[in-house]
Image (cartoon, rainbow, N blue to C red):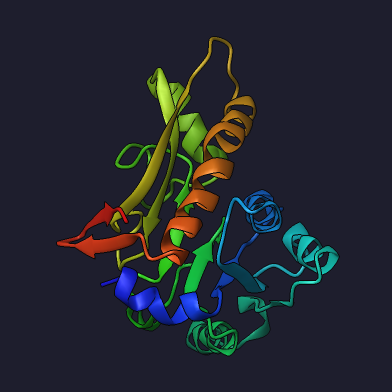
Amino acid sequence: MLGADSMKDSRQGKCRIAVMVSGGGTNLQAVIDGVKDGTITNTEIAGVISNNKNAYALARAQENHIPSRCVSPKDYESRAVFNEKLMEAVDELAPDLVVLAGFLVVIPPEMIRKYRNRMINIHPSLIPSFCGTGYYGLKVHEAALARGVKLTGATVHFVDEGTDTGPIILQKAVEVQQGDTPEVLQRRVMEQAEWKILPRAIDLIANGKVTVQDNRTVIGG
């Protein structure tokens, strides 16, 4: 269970977050900006981890003097060894909260157990719509447009053993407009939803305002 009690120690210092990302890192940038401008309080970015050595997210981290490293499955002889090295990299940062900001690798079950209700993910739809296995990146927006929905959006949720099935923390709706392409819709969802609710969720958690009860979140305090 996560909540005020579990974050009391962090509030004596700052809540340390580890951000995991596979690509360009626009959500990482929103978090960096949020910490800088005070939208996200009581928080420091302990480090950035990517599975992709060419991820622009690593450059963003470097530009902002944030420790970063790549842990790629391509560098190890088996998925089991990669999972072990990935978890070691996260543990070395000693995070209070792990933030998946477009991390396109299956999280090892042992990491999910260790960081139960201390790991969050941002997904570009209003869960339970257009989520689960196979729904990521542009595929989500392609599916939304194919279905003809009038509202889409983004969701921040805790990570559990399922795919996009953990307790929902925040959601924000975005209107679909006539003539939208997947790329245009993706950008609008990022600007109007993802870049707003991910920093907000981190701020709430860092300040002990989120608890999980019976697989649902309670926000308050």
Decide if residue 112 is in sight here.
no
Instruction: Please tell me which residue lies in front, 139 or 176.
Output: 176
Q: Quadrant of residue 85?
A: bottom right
Instruction: Please tell me which residue lies in front, 21 or 212.
Output: 212
The quadrant of the image that shows the N terminus is: bottom left
Q: Residue at x 59, y 43 (%)?
A: 195
Place of residue 147 in the rendered image (x, y in percent of width and height, measured from the top left): 38, 22
Place of residue 185 in the rendered image (x, y in percent of width and height, measured from the top left): 57, 27
**Residue, far right:** 63
Residue 181 higher or lower than 102, as above or below: above
Q: Is residue 14 left or right of residue 53?
A: left
Q: Is residue 15 left or right of residue 74?
A: left
The quadrant of the image that shows the C terminus is: bottom left
Instruction: Please tell me which residue lies in front, 211 or 130.
Output: 211
Place of residue 42 in the rendered image (x, y in percent of width and height, measured from the top left): 55, 66
Q: Residue at x 56, y 61 (%)?
A: 103
Q: Is residue 79 left or right of residue 128?
A: right
